Amino acid sequence: MALIQRKLWKQVSSEEIKDFVIDEYKKQSENPCPVDKIKKFTDSTRRTSCGECVICREGILQLNVVAEAISEGKGRDGDIEILTEISDDLTIGSCCDYGKEVGKITKEILEKGIEEFEKHIKRKRCDALICKKFFSYYIAPQKCNGCNKCKEECPQKAIAGDKDLIHVINSDICDRCGKCTIICEKTAIQKAGAVVPKLPQEPVPVGTFKAEPQNGGGLMAGRRRRRS
């Protein structure tokens, strides 16, 4: 693969190389999480690097490794500085515009999303709820119609429930693959960050669970509503 890419990049102009890298970035342009954006951008560009230039080959790989670690809740103090330094090294030291453009774009993403990077590293939080380590799926009791499709679709068997019951996701088993969100016609399966709404602890009949407001306006523990 590297030899094929090496031959390819030697046949094209600098502008064509830049356009290729920019097109790879554009695939992530709608991604609201800068950490995930850099992770996916560097993952795709490391695979199409020719590998001839050491700083490009190893630099993009290390950018990807660090960004992935941050997205998995393993970020450490100093990671932002490491990403910045590697990006600068790529921009200055790469032999062609491939590595230079990757370094330039990565640093731009980093600078614009610096606050989000700090939240991921210091607070273990992803405001966009994109990084799987920082969110969980739950089934909104008011929307679930007990169709059982999500349970049948779940490869991890993380969903409890049956026909006409409000289903419940076991977050300890769920791997956040998202397949249940695709199959659910009621959009009942939603994401939550650190704060999760009050939910039934086990499957209950559809229409019997109600989360009532406290005097202060918040939500108290949900309870089953008696059928009339």
Image: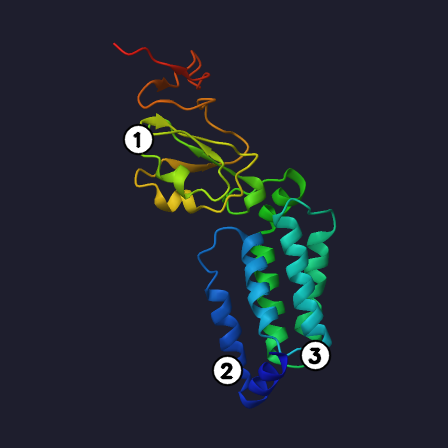
- The spot of residue 169 in percent (x, y) is 47, 32
Left or right: 116 in relation to 149: right
Left or right: 118 in relation to 178: right
- The amino acid on which the numbered mark 1 sits, given as a three-letter code, is Asn
- The spot of residue 130 in percent (x, y) is 51, 47
Residue with the mark numbered 2? 16
The relative height of residue 8 versus residue 205 in the rendered view (above or below) is below
Asked whether the viewer can see residue 103, the reply is yes
Asked whether the viewer can see residue 87, the reply is no
Q: Residues within 10 Å of mark 1 (few under 14, many from 20)?
A: some
Q: Secondary structure at mark 1?
A: loop
Residue located farthest toward the left when viewing the structure as drawn: 228
- The spot of residue 83 in percent (x, y) is 68, 59
Residue with the mark numbered 1? 145
Q: Nearer the viewer, residue 86 or 142?
A: 142
Q: How is the image coloured?
A: rainbow
The relative height of residue 55 versus residue 222 in the rendered view (above or below) is below
* Marks 1/2: CA–CA distance: 52 Å
Q: Secondary structure at mark 3?
A: loop
* Marks 2/3: CA–CA distance: 18 Å
Q: Residues within 10 Å of mark 3 (few under 14, many from 20)?
A: some
Residue with the mark numbered 3? 53
